[in-house]
């Protein structure tokens, strides 16, 4: 009995001390890690839409994506004149050769890609990893529904990129993610162009504002936010503005 | 004399008992991370850091940790250090930790660390254990760099990311993939064994000659 107690106590002491150390280091590094994530996200947004001065979250409900792709919220890039210059969003494909591939896509207001950045991937160096090099530049100035071309397989597709030689899986995954991102942004573009400048005439889908909307409006102190979009994407509790009208307000 | 024995402990990990080429420990990360020299150095040095820290702590606690729970205790300590190093890397060197990806947490189950804890640190003084950790860590890193140099140069035409042959060179992609890892390791092992057999023969011949003269 005594032996078991000693074993237990000693093991407990060791684990307790290790846990305390872990907690301390975590406390110190957690904000830095979060900051790293944000900074790189902000920086990448600027790279994708250099003419934008600032970025606002767009609240349009995004279309369903295939199960292997996740598209994140769309940001509108606002230029110095207050007009929308383009949109940025990020997408993750789970179908990379080595796991998830994350991309960020910048699209101008006409729906054409400005550029794409690969933000995270675990692909094989020398093969799939080439995706983050010059290969990604192929996407610039393309539209949506891009096809991957392997020795002519894409035929007469309107937009195509050449596959990385020896890395078809990577090429496909990245292209799918980019396509999903562009599709989402296209929905936002269509949505915004539906509503006239100040959005007052937008269909009154929902006059009752949900608690989430109240919160988010307070958070961002946006007094001019009169038009609340009925179709609020439940997950987002940030500013719920339509890109164009917000642009005019600041 | 003491200096000599400490140096011996250190060099043991680099040459005589190199963890990869002689002890055959830590094969999984060895084969997986050696696709590029930069990754190899990053991985090797991170493992070395964990090795030194865990060897030190386990040696300090060698009288405190009861025999029956030693494996559990070692794993807790090692996992703790790896997690701390992972958090520090995520915070201060995010690019490196991105490219090492899942291999950092995998250091926890790297047999080298548990192996040295069990075989050495639990039975030797803290100073010796630190030296052993350093030696093993450097031996590991050197081995990784050797293997990844071959794989990267032949498989991607670059060394540490610097293109060596220009765009006309068609690299042997197989070297970058898992089969290439085994091939490279096998060839390097053969070379090392040839060298060490020759040395043994030389020493044996020497000793035989000396005996003859003495007789």
Image (cartoon, coloured by chain):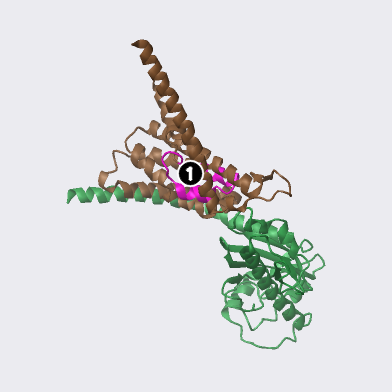
Chain colours: A green, B brown
Identified at 54% across, 43% down, the residue is B147
Side of A24 where A107 appears, left or right: right
Q: Position of residue A172 (x, y in %)?
A: 64, 67
Q: Secondary structure at mark 1?
A: helix
* Image mark count: 1
Side of A17 where A45 appears, left or right: right
Q: Circle 1: is it few (<14), some (14-19), or many (20+) Cα within 10 Å?
A: many
Q: Position of residue A168 (x, y in %)?
A: 64, 64
Q: Nearer the viewer, residue B80 or A201?
A: B80
Residue B23 magenta-highlighted: yes
Q: Which residue is mark 1?
A: B47
Q: Position of residue A128 (x, y in %)?
A: 63, 58
Identified at 45% across, 43% down, the residue is B50
Please identify the residue farthest to the left as the structure is shown.
A1
Residue A113 magenta-highlighted: no
Quarter holding the C terminus of chain A is bottom right
Q: Nearer the viewer, residue B132 or A96?
A: A96
Name the dominant secondary structure of the magenta segment. helix
Picture quarter containing residue B121?
Answer: top left
Side of A213 where A246 appears, left or right: right
Magenta part of the chain: B20-47
The answer for which chain carries disc 1 is B
Q: Position of residue A36 (x, y in %)?
A: 61, 54
Q: Is residue A21 among the parts visible in the rendering?
A: no
Answer above or below: position of A231 versus A17. below
Identified at 31% across, 39% down, the residue is B62
Please identify the residue farthest to the right as the structure is shown.
A81
Identified at 61% across, 46% down, the residue is B152
Picture quarter containing residue A87?
Answer: bottom right
Q: Is residue A171 among the parts visible in the rendering?
A: yes
């Amino acid at each position: 009995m005594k032996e078991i107690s000693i074993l237990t106590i000693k093991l407990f002491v060791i684990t307790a001390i290790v846990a305390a150390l872990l907690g301390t280091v975590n406390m110190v590094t957690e904000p830095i890690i979060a900051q790293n994530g944000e900074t790189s996200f902000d920086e990448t947004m600027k790279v994708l839409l250099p003419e934008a001065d600032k970025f606002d979250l767009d609240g349009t409900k995004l279309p369903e994506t295939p199960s292997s792709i996740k598209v994140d919220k769309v940001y509108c890039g606002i230029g110095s004149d207050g007009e929308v210059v383009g949109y940025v969003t990020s997408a993750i494909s789970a179908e990379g050769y080595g796991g998830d591939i994350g991309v960020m896509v910048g699209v101008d207001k006409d729906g054409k890609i400005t550029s794409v950045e690969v933000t995270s991937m675990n692909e094989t160096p020398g093969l799939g990893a080439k995706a983050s090099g010059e290969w990604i530049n192929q996407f610039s100035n393309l539209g949506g529904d891009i096809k991957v071309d392997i020795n002519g397989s894409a035929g007469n597709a309107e937009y195509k990129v050449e596959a990385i030689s020896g890395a078809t899986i990577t090429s496909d995954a990245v292209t799918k993610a980019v396509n999903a991102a562009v599709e989402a942004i296209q929905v936002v573009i269509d949505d915004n162009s539906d509503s006239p400048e100040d959005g007052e005439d937008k269909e009154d889908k929902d006059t009752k504002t949900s608690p989430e909307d109240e919160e988010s409006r307070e958070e961002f102190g946006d007094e001019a936010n009169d038009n609340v979009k009925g179709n609020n994407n439940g997950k987002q509790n940030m500013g719920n503005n339509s890109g164009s009208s917000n642009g005019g307000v600041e | 004399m003491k200096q000599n024995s400490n140096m011996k402990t250190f060099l043991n990990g680099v040459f005589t008992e190199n963890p990869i080429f002689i002890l055959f420990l830590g094969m999984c990360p060895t084969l997986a991370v050696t696709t590029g020299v930069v990754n190899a150095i990053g991985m090797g040095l991170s493992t070395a850091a964990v090795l030194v820290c865990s060897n030190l702590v386990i040696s300090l606690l060698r009288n405190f940790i009861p025999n029956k729970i030693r494996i559990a205790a070692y794993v807790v300590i090692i996992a703790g250090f790896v997690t701390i190093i992972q958090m520090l890397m995520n915070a201060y060197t995010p690019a490196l930790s991105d490219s090492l990806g899942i291999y950092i947490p995998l250091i926890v189950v790297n047999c080298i660390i548990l192996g040295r804890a069990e075989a050495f640190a639990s039975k030797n003084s803290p100073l010796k254990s630190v030296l052993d950790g350093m030696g093993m860590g450097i031996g590991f890193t050197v081995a990784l760099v050797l293997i990844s140099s071959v794989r990267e140069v032949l498989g991607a035409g670059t060394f540490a990311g610097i293109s060596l042959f220009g765009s006309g060179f068609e690299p042997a992609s197989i070297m970058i993939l898992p089969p290439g890892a085994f091939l490279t390791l096998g060839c390097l092992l053969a070379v090392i064994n040839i060298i060490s057999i020759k040395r043994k023969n030389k020493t044996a011949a020497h000793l035989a000659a000396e005996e003859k003269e003495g007789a």
